Amino acid sequence: MEIKLFNGLHDRLETFKPIQPGKVTMYVCGPTVYDYVHIGNLRPLVVFDVLKKLFIALGYQVHHVSNYTDIDDRIIEKAQKEKVDEATIAKRYIQAYQEDVAKMNALLPNQTPTVTEHLQAMITFIGKLIKDGFAYKTPSGDVFFRVNKVKNYGQLSHVDIHENKIGARVEVNPDKENPFDFVLWKHTTQGIKFSAPFGEGRPGWHTECVVMIKETFKQTLIDIHGGGFDLKFPHHENEMAQAQVAYQSRLANYWLHNGFINLNAEKMSKSTGNIFLAKDFLSTYSGPLLRYVLLATHYRMPVNISPLIIDNAQQELKKIQIGVAQIASYIQLQGASINNQKATPPASFLATLADDINTSNALTIIHQYLKEANGLLRQSHPPLDILLNRFFTIQAMLSILGLAIEFPILTTEDHQLYKDYLQAKSNQNFGRSDEIRKILHQRNILF
């Protein structure tokens, strides 16, 4: 099946063609682990989890890598404030993030490299850039990348460095040869620091992923590089610039970026305090609900989180939960098994996701299948074989979207209770049958 993805490098839909047939290499920028993540940080998690599951469903082998930035000024600041080392802070928030990932029912990456694990490779990489004239050391001890050495700098973000306003997303620093030059190595006297031939310090953010891609994939060009839209410039642009001069590579063939999440129609930002921490949302609501909210909008479009949006998503998710539970209960009450059977998602569903990860339309297809199944259940003699097929097909679709929908597994007691209910109805003992029906309803067996 042909897969089309919106490639941020060219700002257009393109047919996906892997470097190696049948295999996909995908790197997604992960969190900087200085605090609990907000729900915006979980959007790329969901987007690329669905894409990964789609590839697997279509028969691809997927090598998925997502990093943790465990060296950062904010980590150092928090470590000093709490009087602990930086590793303690990073470990705490990596664990917290992984707990969020589990609640979101996302597949773990094949590898989750950290900066500290690949520090020596970063030092070697920066040293080579200095030697080849693509980077320079300043009097203050920092090392910067020479942007003017890249003739097509801005090709990913389509930013014109001659028109971009200095001081907006470009650091003002008198030590720079060019205002757009970016730091590769920060000289520091505070916090965690490492020895390098060009002085003590720590690596800059833009160098990390370039090096970790080569270290984890053992190649300098991968299929897909993803992350939030805010990473397109300067982060991903600067990654590509380094790869071009160091590897003669654009680092990835397809650059995918998800849209922002707004909270009550305003951009979510820790600096302004307008945030909704993932752990708070997941404890107040649930992982499936947050996934549904994110899946209901195309990944490149902004998502607005508000009480109304959450309420609407809850209602739609409830329809799926009730529909799945109804089918599962009926199948079991007829003596059939709902365990260990697999089905292939319908071609229409896969084609929808293969059209630039169109999850909102994919949800519509699931609702259509549930509506059809509900119609079958309303028949005087619901067809068990068709309902079995519908049940496992719906489960296959939900699995790709990562929606973990619980349904009742009937016990011997449940089966006996149902028989008692039917017997009471047959005997026209409606008081008793109503009493049993209430119990069956509470157990999500009858609705």
Image (spheres, helix red, strand yellow):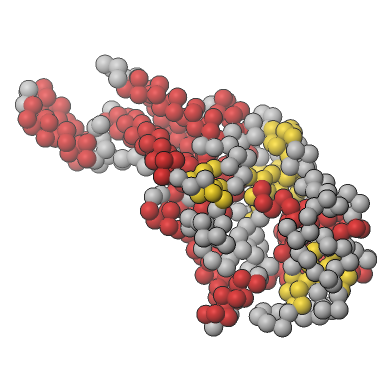
Residue 40's spot in the image, x, y percent?
55, 52
Residue 134's spot in the image, x, y percent?
90, 64
- Residue 139 falls left or right of residue 387: right
Q: In which quarter of the image is the N terminus?
A: top right
Could you tell me which residue is drawn at 17 percent across and 33 percent down? 437
Residue 96 higher or lower than 6, as above or below: below
Residue 335's spot in the image, x, y percent?
29, 30
- Residue 248 falls left or right of residue 443: right
Could you tell me which residue is drawn at 27 percent across and 38 percent down? 444
On the question of residue 348 being in view, the answer is yes
Could you tell me which residue is drawn at 41 percent across and 49 percent down? 286
On the question of residue 403 being in view, the answer is no
Residue 241 higher or lower than 254, as above or below: below
In depth, the one of 170 and 71 nearer the eye is: 170
Could you tell me which residue is drawn at 53 percent across and 33 percent down? 360
User: Please, which residue is most extreme toward the right here?
Assistant: 132
**Residue 167, image quadrant:** bottom right
In depth, the one of 166 and 49 nearer the eye is: 166
